Image (cartoon, helix red, strand yellow):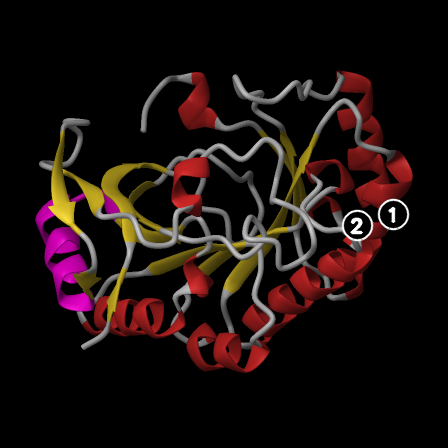
Amino acid sequence: MSQGYIQEIFSSFQGEGASVEGSCYGLRQIFIRFSGCPLALGVHGTKGCIWCDSPKSWNTTPKKCYIETKAGTQSFEEMANPLTSKDVLDIVKRLSTKDLHSVSLTGGEPLYQESFVSDIITSLKEAGYKTYLETAYTDNFQFLEEISEKIDYACVDIKDKTADAASEWKKLVVQEVEMGRILKDAGSKVFAKTVITKASKKEDFEFIAKMCGSIRLPIVIQFVTPTSKSKVEQPTWKQIDEFSQIAGKYLPPNRIGISIQMHKAIEIL
């Protein structure tokens, strides 16, 4: 039984996505936030997304994690890391409610802890849960192929250039789109999410849209949520309008959507 590091586990509602295949927007999920992010650790030459909304998860080996005591209470207790995959399953069972749709594997980057996340996915599927993977990066495509048949839903976060997530930005986008292809080919309902800012450029988004269109991967255009530590500005309506029309050159209308971080807007977990 493998062990790994968790930042937090709680019950809430999926706040990202839109009306495209693969999205679980507005549905009840249990969120397992894994520790560690290879992009923040410099695997692509930078220190990760400049507007990351969960920078605490960059710590690869936190001594403690935070577990919601009961679904909906937003009250947490501390647990010592590392946890076993059985520990995680027991917590999921305790937080389960009758309106639970799926379990979100998020981060950080859940694919960073390969054996740990693999064991958790397996145990969740054996227990009858649906799985939702939120991922931005792996270079181990063989591992992704091995687990992808157990992923019911997935969101691949394709980084806009303004995220500063890679020194060779197009190379990262190509890898992320390939992740989408692997998941899609395995039968997962998967979509791409791209967070854009006021500084985002049409030509950069068109590269992303064209790549997604080549494999008919649905795309969600998401407004950035400014953080206290970044000076990032939200995109204008004109940008959103233009970017959606750009996506329409490569994808049918039912594979294009826009999104905000709903959970941030209404101040829930």
Mark seen at residue 249: 1
- Residue 224 falls in which quadrant of the image? top right
Q: Which amino acid does label 2 sit on?
A: Ala
* Residue 263 position within the rendered picture, expressed as x and y whole percent measured from the top left: 40, 26
- Residue 76 falls in which quadrant of the image? top left
Between residue 72 and residue 161, name the one nearer to us: 161
Q: What residue type is labelled 1?
A: Lys
* Residue 152 position within the rendered picture, expressed as x and y whole percent measured from the top left: 41, 64
Between residue 82 and residue 195, name the one nearer to us: 82
Can residue 41 be seen in this snapshot? yes
| Span shown in magenta | 85-100
* Residue occupying image coordinates x 76% and y 17%: 236
Label 1 SS: loop
Main structural element of the magenta stretch: helix, strand or loop? helix
* Residue occupying image coordinates x 15% and y 36%: 71
Task: Look at the picture and state if 64 lies above or below 237.
Answer: below
* Residue 189 position within the rendered picture, expressed as x and y whole percent measured from the top left: 51, 61
Question: Mark 2 touching mark 1, by CB under 8 A?
Answer: yes
> In the figure, is residue 12 to the left or right of 184?
left
* Residue occupying image coordinates x 39% and y 38%: 56
Crowd around label 1: few <14 · some 14–19 · many ≥20 (10 Å):
few
Mark seen at residue 209: 2
Q: Which is more foreground, mark 2 or mark 1?
A: 2
N-terminal-most mark, 2 or 1: 2
* 98 drawn magenta: yes
